[in-house]
Amino acid sequence: DDGRAPSGKQQHQLLFTLTITINEDLHRRRTEPVPPSSNASKDDDGRAATAAKQGRTEVERERKEAEKRIIIATIMSDDSSTSSAESAVEVEEKEAEEITDLSNSDVCTKYQEASKIVNLALTGLISQCVPGAQVLDLCKFGATIIDASSSKLYNKKVNGVAVEKGVAFPVCVSVNDVICNNSPLGSEEMEPLKAGDIVKIDLGCHIDGYISVAAHTLIVPEAADSQPEVDEEMGNVAVAAYNAMLVAAASIKAGAKNTSVTEIVNRVADSYCVNAISSVRMHQMKRFVIDGVKEVALKDPTADELEAGEEKVDECTFEQAEVYAVDVAMSTGEGKPRPSGVHRTTVFKRNVEANYRLKMKNSRYLLSEVDKKFPTLPFTLAHFDDERAAKMGVTECVSHGLLTPYPVLHEQKDAKVAHFKCTVLLLPSGTSRVTGLDMPGYYKTDKKPDEETQKLLTELAEIAAKKAKKKANKKKKKKAAK
């Protein structure tokens, strides 16, 4: 009556009432007897019969019209109900939209669990780095720890879908002047480790796409229970890289800029008379994204490097609830990495924005497997059952931009390289470093950092000591309670 369209519920009520009324009326008119006329003639009887027939025809016509009205009303009601249902679903979806940053406590927990696995894998790998160990076996060992540890967590399906977890970055073991990304295939032979080798371990784990990464540098000892001998150059570069990682991690906080972190890293490198590796960058990480848009350069590219194609990192500001991989690699050499002419590139990542109709069968096999198993995160060719087909198909995939390679990089011969990496969470309470092990005690140096860096390092050491003391006290209380 007020001119407004009836609601879905009101339409259903009107439809039900209309249907009952029409059916009752039709039934009544069909069964109502025609009153007989005692004095009626045959002509009257004929006219009465004709009238009755016309009446039944009229009733049938009204029945069909009523059915049409019912069908139209039903359609209108269904459309309205569907529209209302769709609107309700949209509202529910918006309300239930998943929060994927650190403002969600469950996300924080997943980062913490992935970080524990990363540190566990690093610790296990360090114990296996002894003379005679094979690089391939070490890579497999690290991946096994990650897969086995993550398989014990989050096994309950979410909306009928299993939670993804496992290796986020392939386990890479790079020796001596090789800087990073060395993850050999089973068909390739490498020299076993020997005492005095400089070993860089790099790996990552994710729980439900929330990634934690870390890297560590060690010297292979003569025996598992002995301390390796470290020369002055190695001590300088290892201490420089580790301290640069610590101060960079502490400097990545809400409101700070990436350029200030680059300045700090350069200052540390200068203090220890070493060079930061120019191509290594720190990255923001998001769910299923290991190299986000925000980056931090270890050092700004020179004019020659810019001319050669090196890109300058855009300035950005860090924000709360973000996650970063703090990646620092330093060298006693020039700090200019070169693609390895000896080691095959085996680590790649799918470029999700690129598409191309591949011609080779092996290329199509490889891309199909990548899209199924590694649609977003880096992988190694060693993960594929048909290694030969993967090796043959990767060239076409890379040439058409479908896969992004992580080439094995190395420094100049006899240069000493150190690589340390950690993951930091920008929480409301401050920046929290959740991965990365302590620097081995056998790295020594006589060089000192600048005053500002030394002050920050002292503060960080005091904070770490307090945390360690608090942790020790908790353990004592637990033992006493038993």
Image (cartoon, rainbow, N blue to C red):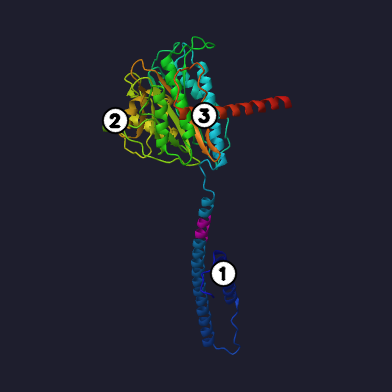
Q: Earlier in the sequence, mark 3 or mark 1?
A: 1
Q: Nearer the viewer, residue 16 or 458?
A: 458
Q: Tell me if residue 305 can be seen.
A: yes
Instruction: Give the residues drawn in magenta, as a range.
Output: 81-88
Quadrant containing the C terminus is top right
Cα distance, mark 2 to mark 1?
77 Å
Sequence-wise, the earlier of marks 3 and 2 is 2
Q: Of helix, strand and loop, which one carries label 2?
A: helix
Tag of residue 435: 3
Q: Residue furthest right?
A: 481
Magenta stretch mostly in which secondary structure?
A: helix
Q: Position of residue 209 (x, y in %)?
A: 49, 36
- For the residue carrying disc 1, how many other residues have a C-alpha within 10 Å: few (<14), some (14-19), or many (20+)? some
Residue named by callout 1: 14
| x and y, in percent, of residue 395 in the image | 31, 28
Q: Is residue 273 left or right of residue 210?
A: left
User: Three-letter amino acid code at disc 2?
Assistant: Glu
Q: Which mark is residue 305?
A: 2
What amino acid is found at the position of numbered circle 3 in the picture?
Answer: Thr
Q: Is residue 482 visible?
A: no
407 or 16, which is in the foreground?
407
Q: Residues within 10 Å of mark 2 (few under 14, many from 20)?
A: some
Looking at the image, residue 236 sits to the left or right of residue 150; the answer is: left
Horizontal and vertical percent position of residue 379: 42, 29
* Marks 3 and 1, how far apart at CA: 66 Å
Assign a secondary structure to mark 1.
Answer: helix
Q: Amino acid at mark 1?
A: Leu
- Give the image location of residue 435, x and y in percent: 52, 29
